[in-house]
Every structure is written in C-alpha cells, then in structure tokens.
Amino acid sequence: MKSFIKLITKSYLARKYFLAKKRETSSGYTLGIVLIVIALIAMLATEFLSSAVKSIRVSAKNSAADQSALYAESGFRLAEMILDADKKGTTGSLNIKTSAETDSYDDLWARNIPPLDLDGYSVKIMIFDEQSKINVNNIYNEFTDSSQTFPYIILNNFFKDMGFDENYTGCILDYIDKDDSKSQYGAETYDYYSRFSSPGSAKNSYLVSINELLMIKGFSWPLFYGITGGNSGIEGKLVDKNYEQEDLSFDMSLSDDSKQTYKETLIAREKSRKLSDYLRVNGKNDDASDDLNKININTAPFRVLIAIPGMTDGFAEEVIEKRKLKPFSSTEELSSVITDPIIRKNHLTVSSNIFSIKVIVSSSGGDFESFGIYNRNIKKYYYMKTL
C-alpha cells in the first residue's frame, strides 16, 4: 500500500507541474484527480475493506454480509464524489461535458457506471434524479392548502393522465393536511379511516416515504405498483424511457464528442406506471416554491412533463427532443409553452439537488442492495435502507 501511495504522489506532482506550465486551473486538476480515484478505487477498496472485514469475528455467513455492507458503503461514498464533481462543473481528465448550472442526462451522474470488481464482489452504482418527479407533499402547507394551487393542479393532472379522477389528489391532501375538514374530493378520519374494524386516522402530517400512499384511500398495491387501474392497458404508444444513457468510460484518450452519438428514438409516455417512478416525498415542505420542490425539465419523464399546465403531447415531445440535443439552461426557454411566469419561476427548474443512489453488491452468496435519497447541496441523506 505504501508503495502504491508513493506512486500516486509522484504521478500527482508530475501532472501538477505539467498543468502549471500550461496555465490550467488547479481546481480543474483537483477534480480530475478526484475522478481518477474512481478508476483506482477498486485497488484501494480491495485491500482496505478486506482487512476490515477479516477483523470481524462472526460466522462465515454473517462475515459475507458484513463485507457486502462495507463495499456498499464505499459505493455510496463514490456516488457522493461523482455528484460533488458534477456540481462543480468539471471532470478534469475524463473529458466529459458536465455543467454546474444544469443537470441533465448528459452529466456525469447520469452515466452508466460500470460495475467495480473487488476481490470476488461486484459493486454496481446507479444514480437517479429525484427532482425529475412530483413532490406530493408540496400540495399542502399552512399557506397553500387549496386545490387551486399549482402543486395540487400538477399532481392532479398527473393522475388524470393516468386515467384516475380527482379523488386521488384530494385524498392525499386530506391525509396530510393538519385539520379534519374533508375537502370536496378527499377523505378524512371521521368519514373513512375511523370506520374500519380496526379504526385508523388521517396522518395530518407529511409523508416520509412514497410507500405511505398505500395507507391512503384509493391507493391499492396493484395501482401503486402500476399493475392495473386507470387507463392501464388502453394507452397508445409507449416507450421504455425517453433518454439515452451513455457509459462512463475511464479511457482518458477519448473525448466526450467521440463517445456520444445522438440516436433518434420514439418519444412517448413511459411504459412504467409505478407511482414511485414519477412521485416523491422529499423536498422542503414548508415552502411550496422552494428550489428543492421544483421539477427539473431537463430530466422529467414524459408523464411528469404532461402534468405541467400548458403542456400537450406535442409540446412534451418537443421539450424532450430539444433537451436531447442541448439541455435547457433556463426555464424561460419554455415561455412559449408554459405561459404562466409563476409556474416557470416557482415550480420548474433546470438543475437538481436531490438524487437517489442505489448500490448493488453481488457475490457468490447473492445480491446485497442498498438505497438512499441524498441532498447534494447539504450532503445529507433523507433516507437510507438495505433492500
């Protein structure tokens, strides 16, 4: 290990001197080093993590589980490094175009990261933009509890497009608002939840997991997981996804331009009807217009875009087509489609700070899956769980 560190140090000093002569910035170089570590982490992690696990005196089965957990932890740290480098807007020697001002499927975090093979374990890291989704908690706070607010309208439009009626949005509103007054389309404790053989009640507080939708009137598990309900099975053309995912290559000799090729593909609603693919609960619940609650138009699925007031199928197709060629740098670029300036300013964005991270550690003993929801801005996890 010591010899390896000496080698890295020597390489670092030589490269630093070379860049200094070229008058390149030290910040860009530092980020280059950070991402080069991604390519080297396999060697470092193998020695360090293997030593750590050997010190744990447990049974063979538990030892394998503990080692998988340690590798999963290293996967999360690596994902955080990738998100941090992307936020700073440069990837050094990796030659990948990424922006500090916008987040799109062109960025570093959105790349298909190849699995890391570590001493018989394979570590797969996947990063997804949570701000491509609609925050269901955003339909209510003490200042905006009306069905006439834009967050409510956007969520309601989503359900309508899925073939559901306004009862679904109303029931969510009544479940999370702080009173027991039933809205026009909702359900409260006195008229619904208290009437079961094992009486329940409306939560009167924000959801902490999207799975809590299953506690609300109307949300059966087949509907939640997109198996049935609404217009399922009778929709028109559908696609798997509306973006192309490039591989993250560690070949420094290739420029980003040489690796990317634009592919013309069908743009339409996504096949998945699983609600967690389009809805979320994390953000800033006491401020409906906070940046964390906004929908990123550069990453939003077709089914989310079509829920924004002013959108049509044709406009949603146009938005996806344009962002494939070049990500939107401002929501004002959609002013001809989204004509209301309040929607553009308060509820849409071109950048993100909330991401979900999934790490799968595979070995001969099976798969160990972990999932977390991470705020890149404050470097904090809202949620983390072993699946």
Image (cartoon, rainbow, N blue to C red):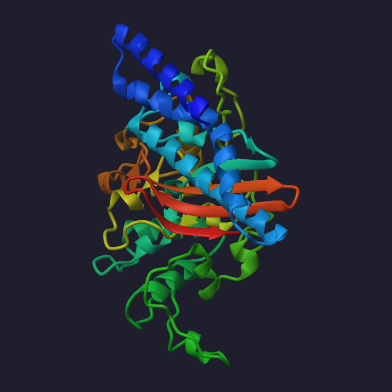
Asked whether residue 298 appears in the rendered view, the answer is no
Task: Give x and y (percent) for residue 333.
Answer: 33, 32
- Give the left or right position of residue 155, taking residue 362 as reference: left
Picture quadrant of residue 240: top right
Q: How many marks?
A: 0
The relative height of residue 385 versus residue 295 in the rendered view (above or below) is below
Task: Give x and y (percent) for residue 299.
Answer: 46, 40
Instruction: Tell me which residue sits at (52%, 44%) in the image.
Output: 74
Taking the view exactly as shown, the residue that stands out farthest to the right is: 364
Instruction: Tell me which residue sits at (29%, 58%) in the image.
Output: 288
Front residue of 252/229: it is 252
Task: Give x and y (percent) for residue 204.
Answer: 37, 77
Picture quadrant of residue 268: top right
Instruction: Tell me which residue sits at (51%, 25%) in the image.
Output: 3
- Quadrant that contains the C terminus: bottom right
Taking the view exactly as shown, the residue that stands out farthest to the bottom is: 197
Front residue of 385/51: it is 51
Asked whether residue 167 appears in the rendered view, the answer is yes
Instruction: Tell me which residue sits at (48%, 30%) in the image.
Output: 37
The relative height of residue 44 versus residue 262 in the rendered view (above or below) is below
The relative height of residue 32 versus residue 147 in the rendered view (above or below) is above
- Give the left or right position of residue 7, taking residue 333 as reference: right
Front residue of 358/244: it is 358
Task: Give x and y (percent) for residue 185.
Answer: 44, 74
